Amino acid sequence: MPAGDGPGQQVPAGGETAQTLDRGLRLLHLVADASAGLTVTEAAHRLGIGRAAVYRLVGALTGHGMLRRGGDGRLRLGVGVLHLARRAQPLLAEGALPALRRLAEQTGATAHLTVVEGGEGVALAVVEPSWTSFHVAYRPGARHPLERGAAGRAVLAGRAGHAGPVSTTGELQAGAYGVAAPVLGVPGLEASVGVISLAPLPVDTVGPQVTAAARTIATALS
């Protein structure tokens, strides 16, 4: 039976299970943050446990599709994580919709929540304003590089610790204007909130509105 903190002490079965779960989740986070993957030795060092314990965690997580070992032996996330993320996306969209509706009505522009998936920005939820004659048609599921468009650039700014709005012109669609701000403080989520319009968007007024919506959505999703 597993030893506790001192001689003669033992970890209760429930405590051992919780510790294993904690280690497994920490391992998933470590692998997710390692763009080139992790070796078992690297994972053991960062977790502060033995290689044998890491192999047991890897075996369980691989069996559930959460991890995979590449041809180079390095650990990477498995398709099971993507499956869970896709199951969670409708909940994220639902939590963001009230703030997106307010933002679309305030600005008269199409509002959207964009999340990072597979190194790209993906429009998860989109709300069009109800009172404008013309607005940008932006479909949920649209993908784009993070380096192009206000939504992706806002995510990159958030990675650097900048919470303020980002504006772009014509990077994803000719003649379209975008303003976006990162959603910060939600563990495991990289996202931005933004608006896109066919008319110029005054950043001094729209920027604070977008940033406020991003904060509201971060609170709703936390």
Image (cartoon, rainbow, N blue to C red):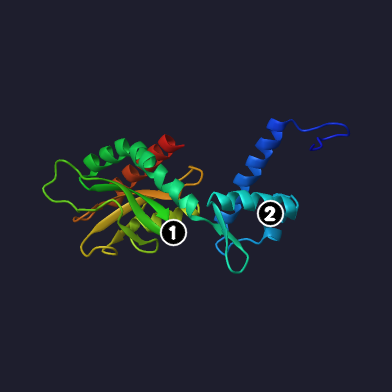
For mark 2, what is the residue? 55
Position in image of residue 87 (x %, y %): 40, 44
> Hey, which residue is sitting farthest bottom in the picture?
72
Give SS at disc 2. Answer: helix
Image quarter for residue 19? top right
Q: Which of marks 2 and 1 is nearer the N terminus?
A: 2
Which amino acid lies under the numbered mark 2 shown in the image of this protein?
A: Tyr
Residue 146 seen: yes
* 47, 154: nearer the viewer: 47
**Count of numbered circles in the view:** 2
* 140, 41: nearer the viewer: 41
Measure the C-alpha gap from mark 2 to mark 1: 26 Å
Position in image of residue 15 (x %, y %): 70, 33
Residue at 51% from the left image edge and 43% from the top image edge: 187
Residue at 36% from the left image edge and 37% from the top image edge: 95
Give SS at disc 1. Answer: loop
* Image disc number at residue 118: 1
